[in-house]
Amino acid sequence: MVVQLSKVPRIEALRPYPARTMDQLARLLAEGATARPDPRRANFFELESDSQIFYVHISPASGRVLLIGVWQRSLVPCSLAPAVQAA
């Protein structure tokens, strides 16, 4: 699924993030980003950039975007990562 907003959304964050992170999220939303809907929560998505994943809530009523979290995108899918063994 691709998420693309027609106008620049109002983006808010739960905690302070660098301006470049917020700018990257705004750019992703304007250009269109690969998104995975959260199956447990309506209107929550993981948006992917080349290097990061953004977890956001997009309000259908106002179009407001709430940035909840950001993490580095793994280059190896979790299913292919080596198993961690208990010592």
Image (cartoon, rainbow, N blue to C red):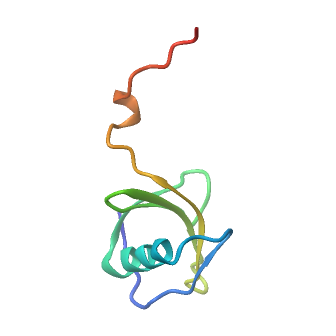
Residue 4 in view here: no
Q: Position of residue 39 (x, y in %)?
A: 54, 51
At x 39%, y 22%, the residue is 82
Q: Position of residue 83 (x, y in %)?
A: 44, 19
At x 57%, y 12%, the residue is 86
Between 40 and 13, the one nearer to me in the picture? 13
- 7 with respect to 11 (left or right): left
Q: Quadrant of the N terminus?
A: bottom left
Q: Quadrant of the C terminus?
A: top right
- 81 with respect to 39 (left or right): left
At x 48%, y 71%, the residue is 21
Between 19 and 33, the one nearer to me in the picture? 19
Residue closest to the far bottom: 7
At x 36%, y 57%, the residue is 51
Q: Position of residue 33 (x, y in %)?
A: 35, 68
Q: Position of residue 77 (x, y in %)?
A: 35, 37
Q: Quadrant of residue 42?
A: bottom right
Residue closest to the far top: 87
